Amino acid sequence: MNDIIMWLIALWTFVMVGLMFIGGYFMFRKFLKRMPKEDGYSELDWQGHYIDRALPLWNKDARNLLNELVTPVPELFRDVAKERIAGRISKIALDEGANDITLDHIMKGYIIATPKRDHKFMKKKLNALDIDYKPYEDLFQYADDEKQKFSIFEQTEKISSRSK
């Protein structure tokens, strides 16, 4: 009986240490996004800045569409995904001098801010909503990629200069 209890304690210890490492990994990633870049602002600072400046441009339809587009994301991460996508959409709209957020801005920001590993789910959601993403096919190459480690706010020139 003592051997079984000792094995259960050892197993529980390994499980807890593993969970702590996983949690630490995600906390460290958040910490890195909070670190200031050369300009003194972090990725999350810029994201908040663009969202705050573009808040008047967001109409009810645009907000509802954004909420619908992030529904495939697990609820635990949905708010983070929504802020990331909204920050990217806001920057695109502000750079173009738009008066309000349109489907074009939402599609550009949604594609760029969605990680490449999630494109299959993104396309499935767009098809379910009957939204044609074919005109934006060239933007998939600029999407967030964990391996390239670039800021999602660095792709503005490429998006703005693309042919319509």
Image: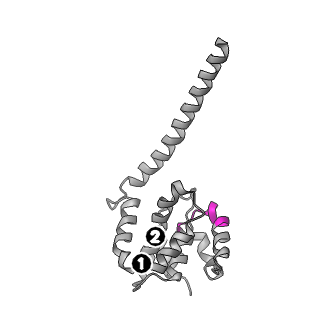
Residue extending farthest front: 1
Q: What distance separates the C-alpha of mark 1 from that of mark 2?
A: 10 Å
Answer with left or right where residue 27 lies relative to residue 38. Answer: right
The residue under label 1 is 58
Q: Is 15 above or below relative to 56?
A: above
Q: Amino acid at mark 2?
A: Ala
Q: Position of residue 5 (x, y in %)?
A: 63, 17
Q: Find residue 73 and report its image quarter.
A: bottom right
Identified at 55% across, 71% down, the residue is: 68
Q: How is the image coloured?
A: one colour
Q: Would you say the magenta stretch is mainly helix, strand or loop? A: helix
In this view of the protein, can residue 5 be seen by the observer? yes
Q: Find residue 18 and report its image quarter.
A: top right
Q: Is 97 above or below relative to 63?
A: below
Q: Which segment did they paint magenta?
A: 113-121
The residue under label 2 is 86
- Which quadrant holds the C terminus? bottom right
Q: Is 1 above or below relative to 133?
A: above
Q: Position of residue 31 (x, y in %)?
A: 41, 49
Q: Which mark is residue 159?
A: none
Q: Residues at badges 1 and 2 in contact (C-beta under 8 Å)? A: yes
In this view of the protein, can residue 109 be seen by the observer? no
Circle 1: is it few (<14), some (14-19), or many (20+) Cα within 10 Å?
Answer: some
Identified at 50% across, 62% down, the residue is: 81
Q: Position of residue 127 (x, y in %)?
A: 67, 75
Residue extending farthest top: 2
Q: Nearer the viewer, mark 1 or mark 2?
A: 1
Q: Amino acid at mark 1?
A: Trp
Answer with left or right where residue 142 lies relative to residue 40. Answer: right
Identified at 56% across, 70% down, the residue is: 69
